Image (cartoon, helix red, strand yellow):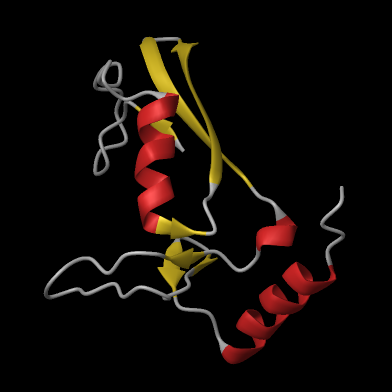
């Protein structure tokens, strides 16, 4: 994920907030995901200025990742919910997708 662009126009709008750090992201994710999602965050140069680059470090042995804390009112996300990406959409997995994620997590060598 690249931070520093307008969601609607996709135009560069400036560097990310300096308060956004690797440590802050790790603290947030430790409360919201189970198991904790590993990330790498850095501010990098872009042709128009600095942008934030957030990488999700997928660990198959932790699959599936789930929501750890229920949030929201109208669009409620519940603890235990799992989401997958279908193109540009984020949705709950089909039964087959969930089974594949669980199987991948169960069969991954955890000693690697």
Q: Is residue 60 left or right of residue 8?
A: right
Query: At 61% from the left edge and 81% from the top edge, which residue is drawn?
Result: 98
Q: Is residue 85 left or right of residue 48?
A: right
Image location of residue 35, percent across then percent down: 54, 58
Query: At 54% from the left edge and 38% from the top edge, which residue is drawn?
Result: 39
Of 42 and 49, which appears nearest the observer?
42
Q: Quadrant of residue 12?
A: top left
Query: At 66% from the left edge and 49% from the top edge, which residue is drawn?
Result: 58
Image location of residue 102, percent across then percent down: 69, 77
Total number of numbered discs in the rendering: 0
Above or below 105: residue 24: above
Image location of residue 40, percent across then percent down: 55, 30
- Check the image and name the residue furthest to the bottom: 95
Of 106 and 20, which appears nearest the observer?
106
Image location of residue 106, percent across then percent down: 77, 73
Of 101 and 5, which appears nearest the observer?
101
Q: Is residue 21 left or right of residue 98?
A: left
Query: At 32% from the left edge and 65% from the top edge, which residue is drawn?
Result: 69
Q: Quadrant of residue 17?
A: top left
Above or below 7: residue 100: below
Above or below 65: residue 3: above
Above or below 80: residue 6: above
């Amino acid at each position: 994920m690249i931070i520093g662009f307008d969601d609607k126009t996709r135009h560069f709008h400036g560097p990310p907030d300096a308060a956004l750090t690797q440590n802050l992201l790790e603290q947030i994710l430790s409360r919201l995901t189970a198991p904790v999602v590993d990330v790498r965050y850095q501010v990098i140069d872009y042709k128009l200025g600095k942008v934030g680059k957030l990488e999700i470090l997928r660990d198959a042995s932790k699959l599936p990742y789930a929501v750890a804390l229920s949030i929201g009112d109208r669009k409620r996300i519940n603890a235990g919910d799992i989401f997958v990406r279908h193109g540009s959409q984020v949705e709950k997995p089909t039964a087959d997708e969930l089974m594949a994620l669980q199987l991948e997590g169960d069969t991954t060598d955890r000693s690697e």
